[in-house]
Amino acid sequence: MGTPDLSVDITLLKATERQLHGIKGEFEGIDDWKKELRAVVGAPRMAKAMSTFVDNWDRHRKGLVEEIDKIGGWVETTRKTFEKADKDLADSAEKAKREKARAKGK
C-alpha cells in the first residue's frame, strides 16, 4: 500500500472546532468583562475609557461572532464529511474482504 492521496487530521479539525467555540464565547462574554473591569480599575477615567472601547467593539463584535460561527460550521461539516467517508470506505473494504473470503470458500 502506498502513500495516501489525501490525509485529513480529524484531531486538528476537532481542536479547531473547540478553539473557535472558545473564541466565540470570549466575544459573547465581553459585556461581563466590562462589568468586572469597572470593579478592578480604580481610576474612573480609565474605567470609562475601557468601557467606551468595549462599547465601540459592540459594533464589530456581532459580525465577528457571525463569521466565527460560519467558519466553525464549515470545519464541523468538513470533519463530519470526512469521518463519514472514512467509515463508508472502511465498511466497503470490509464487505469486499468478506465476499472475497466467501468466494474462496466455495
Image: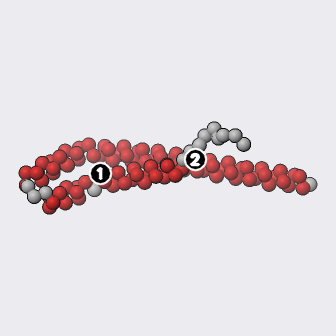
Residue type highlighted by circle 2 = Phe
Q: Decide: is 3 above or below 86.
A: above
Q: Position of residue 1 (x, y in %)?
A: 72, 42
Label 2: state its secondary structure.
helix
Relative horizontal placement of residue 95, taking residue 42 as reference (left or right): right
The C terminus, quarter of image: bottom right
Relative horizontal placement of residue 65, taking residue 8 as reference (left or right): left
Q: Are marks 1 and 2 in contact (CB under 8 Å)?
A: no
User: Nearest the camera: 92 or 22?
Assistant: 22
Relative horizontal placement of residue 78, taking residue 86 as reference (left or right): left
How many numbered discs sit on the rendered protein? 2
Instruction: Specify few, some or many for label 1: CA neighbours under 10 Å numbering under 14, 14-19, or 20 or more.
Output: some
Residue type highlighted by circle 1 = Phe
Q: Decide: is 5 above or below 19.
A: above
Relative horizontal placement of residue 39, taking residue 58 as reference (left or right): left
CA distance for labels 1 and 2: 30 Å
Q: Which mark is residue 27?
A: 1
Q: Which mark is residue 84?
A: none
Q: Which mark is residue 82?
A: 2
Q: Position of residue 80 (x, y in %)?
A: 54, 50
Rendered residue at 31%/43% (across/down): 63
- The single residue placed furthest to the right in the displayed view is 106
> Which mark is first along the chain, 2 or 1?
1
- The single residue placed furthest to the front in the displayed view is 2
Rendered residue at 47%/46% (across/down): 75
Q: Quadrant of residue 4?
A: top right
Q: Position of residue 31 (x, y in %)?
A: 23, 55
Q: Position of residue 65 (x, y in %)?
A: 33, 47
Label 1: state its secondary structure.
helix
Rendered residue at 15%/60% (across/down): 40
Rendered residue at 27%/46% (across/down): 61
